[in-house]
Image (spheres, rainbow, N blue to C red):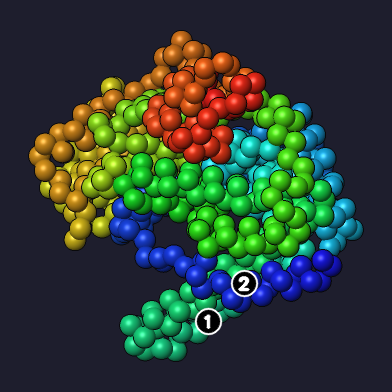
Amino acid sequence: MTSATAREKGRGLVRARVARAGRSTCAMLTLVGLLTGCAGVDLDRSTVPLTQSKLSAADTADMSPAQRREHERLVASYGGAYDDPELKALIQQVVERLVAASERPDLKYRVTVLNSPAINAFALPDGSLYVTRGLLALANDTSEMSSVLAHEMAHVIARHASIREDQVKQAVLVSRVISDVVADQNMGALAMQKSRQTLATFSRGQELEADAIGVGIAARAGFDPYGASRFLTDMGKQASLRTSAFGGASSTTPDMDFLATHPATPDRISIAIANAREYAAPGAGERDKAAYLAAIDGMVYGDDPKEGYVRGRNFFHPKLGFTFTAPEGFSLENTSQAVLGATANGSEALRLDAVRVSGDQSLGQYLASGWIDGVEINSVESLSVNGFTAATAVARGDQWSFRMFAIRFGSDVYRLIFAARNLTPELDKQFRAAASTFRRVASDEAQSVKPLRIRIVTVGIGDTVEKMAGRMQVADHPMERFLILNGLDRDAKLAYGSKVKIVVE
């Protein structure tokens, strides 16, 4: 099939199925609003990133000043670049094959591996491609990795990034006109919401078109075109596992964009399979699993200790020098801007971040300064947390109540915000006890920290998924994580001599 036919086929699939494949709720839970800065909480004001990675001059040597600024912003927001020469060499080989097989073999691409456990990949109009090590850990062979890279290249080829930028500018203009002209606030809000929905629908259409173009590129490059459907399936399982840990909520932080904008719905997977069938029958095309697994052997998995890491209910940041333990029943997640947490049933949540507060403003004054609605002024209390100056207060909204702490640590103030649908005295006591665990990390404690890593092991006689999952040194869901990492079902039988991924220190 020609390139033009592949492009038209992708657009036809978009027109026929985008309404079903891209359908998802736009209403965010109040819980997620708390975690990401909504629900009457101005969490972004003066926030200090928890990760502080720097870039080398070599990373930006051939960029224009504008490209360099954008590149530095993106890389810094994902914990810096991940340096692994062998992995980088494999990715470069795959990209070169994909470029030669694409509709635009004249384009040049620069790939950066981001030092983030998030599952994400994206492209800029100038051909800069970004992929996180979290995504690479999830893939199981070169065809699955190539499906992601080809998808992002398709966005560049089809000028999606440029088109999207124009759409965003138009949406902003429409919103301004509405706010200036429409006197009825309810009608204005409704019109702006419809404008946002139109933009979101167009974006989903771009994703499905990129799927179709990407499968064609990968197939023509000689890779197994079914790699896309396999990766989407595993990505969907990973998203479900993460969602269940956060009480049914899904984060909208920058680290989670790929899971949010690339939903692995059954319809999307079926479309990917249909795309692949246009090129080959199942089993055709290169996977080269052995080379891929060898390249990711030893890769950091999960949080990089240099940027702070989660172990069960404990969060450590050796670089910034502090640690904290969440209450019983909480799952934690580390992002570049904050540590997020929630209970499995979604009835409680927390956020830990850092801000700059003027030295002439007391922490009690800061808590009452209006960055969160509904503060009970008579609840503001000054205290000390393990020798650090601190303050606490309660704020109440229609559906959620908040127990807030501000702790001065070095030049920053750390905000520890707990939320509950029903802030009972017993629950408030648990939140206070958790806040009291915020302390300085001892030097020997920081030096003993080792990152978790992907290790490739050979299946022995008698090895089962249960035995292999038992070797996983993860804090939760070892069986589920082993199966997802290896693209396996629960009843899978491991073949003697085959290679699998496990996570160990």
- Which of 283 and 275 lies nearest the eye of the viewer? 283
Residue 110 located left or right of residue 323: right
Please tell me how crowded label 1 is: few (under 14), some (14-19), or many (20+) other residues with Cα within 10 Å: some
Q: Residue 14: which numbered mark, if any?
A: 2
> Residue at image x 48%, y 74%?
197
**Front position among marks 1 and 2:** 2
Instruction: Farthest residue to the top: give it.
Output: 444
Residue 113 located left or right of residue 374: right
Labels 1 and 2: the sequence-earlier one: 2
Q: Name the amino acid type tagged 1.
A: Val
Q: Quadrant of residue 90?
A: top right
Q: Name the amino acid type tagged 2.
A: Val
> Residue at image x 36%, y 45%?
244
Say which quadrant the N terminus sits in: bottom right
Does residue 192 lie above or below 158 as drawn? below
Observer able to see residue 2: yes
